[in-house]
Image (tube, rainbow, N blue to C red):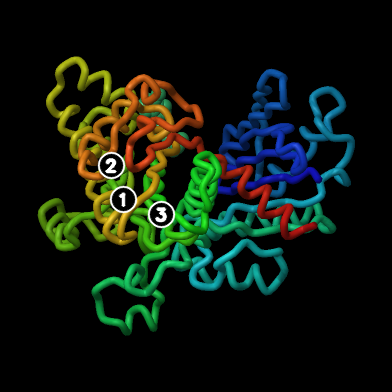
Amino acid sequence: MKILIINCGSSSLKFQLIDSESEKVLAKGLCERIGIDGGMLNYQPEGKDKIVKNVEMADHTVAVQLVIDSLVDEKDGVIKGLDEIGAVGHRIVHGGEKFAEATIINDEVIKAIEECNDLAPLHNPANLIGIRSCQKIMPKVPMVAVFDTAFHQTMPKKAYLYGIPYEYYKKYKIRRYGFHGTSHSYVSKRTAEILGKDYNNMNIIVCHLGNGASISAVKNGKCVDTSMGLTPLEGLIMGTRSGDLDPAILEFLCQKEKLSISEVLNVLNKKSGVLGLSEISSDFRDIGKEADAGNDQAKTTLEAYSYRVAKYIGAYVAALNGVDAIAFTAGVGENDGSRREAICEYLGYLGIELDKEKNGKRGEELVISKPDSKVKVLVVPTNEELAIARETAKLVK
Ligand code: AMP
């Protein structure tokens, strides 16, 4: 079956067409600046060059139609007609407490996703627009919602409750939800497969270190804790997000800088993290270059980043009562050997020994610890689209 994967933002739409049997990506692309002047469609059919078209897209329905037109195009298309698309898998950011698994989309599911809008006001409404646009253009094609939060729904109460009055949990469902769940699920399963171990009988820590970053503790195939919270702002120091901080800093900054709460939150989401700390860039390659050239602020930024990751690993070793494998994934986790090495330097107490040569490789699925390392360390490139395609195929069959 050919499955169209849709990841819809407020003004963008990422897509991939995946053959669920061969698991090959037949085409992929991105619509940018939907509803804004200067729209752009990037389309890449398998084995061919990328095609970039400047085309205005008044709304997401127009964008979905353009995607379909590209996929069925006589010259650059990869399918003959719309009827070859067997299902659509939608990435949905927040499923609240309602969705612990992917689900076939119907009116009731749409309503339940709408009810989670409060929890992800920037993402869920955009995801819903993507669903509705696809339904308009492909009314007979089954659609599946795959949630970023679903994998983390197995967390016990002690891990997901915040130390605030319980009534706020009851009234507003304020709790830890966690994100990047599709990635944590895919990478933890793959880790067990690579090691030839039983996923349901091992402890894994997954470090998803991209522009957004989160870490999860997976016990016997179930997530028991994760670093992102009610929103994706909590936890690790990220590209532009602060991660954990003393909540009193918010009021302090409001007063000193004469900012509103939402302005401070904007600083914490968009101007903090390694960008804010380094005053260089949110990209680790830029910061790494400066650090190598002797820039102390760049060095300290990278140290603070690695230290935070190592602290979380320590906490999750305790939560799991021991760990069998630690997996690195996403942009930094897959490509930045220096970061992995700096993080693992804190983990000698676990009997971890890195194979420096293997750790020097980039973007490959690889065990990077030495054969006699007590805890195995791996690089496992994430593949959220493939994971969404698998979930979709499972439900639509
Ligand atoms: P992601 O959000 O998973 O796409 O990760 C994006 C981030 O990965 C970028 O902002 C970079 O900081 C980082 N990244 C990508 N390639 C490299 C690399 N070769 N070395 C260090 N960091 C990298």
Q: Position of residue 102 (x, y in %)?
A: 62, 61
Crowd around label 1: few <14 · some 14–19 · many ≥20 (10 Å): few
| Residue type at numbered disc 1 | Asn
As drawn, the label of residue 271 is 2
Farthest-out residue, top:
293
Q: Is residue 216 above or below residue 385?
A: below
Q: Residue at x 67, y 31 (%)?
A: 55
Query: Residue at left 77%, top 33%?
Result: 70
Q: Nearer the viewer, residue 193 or 48?
A: 193
Q: Is residue 2 left or right of residue 185?
A: right
Identify the disc placed on residue 266. Answer: 1
Which quadrant: the C terminus?
bottom right
The residue nearer to you, when weighing 317 against 256, is 317
Q: Amino acid at mark 2?
A: Lys
Q: Are marks 2 and 1 in contact (CB under 8 Å)?
A: yes
Q: At 15% from the left edge and 57% from the top edge, which residue is drawn?
A: 249
> Quick one: SS at disc 1?
helix
Q: Position of residue 360 (x, y in %)?
A: 37, 21
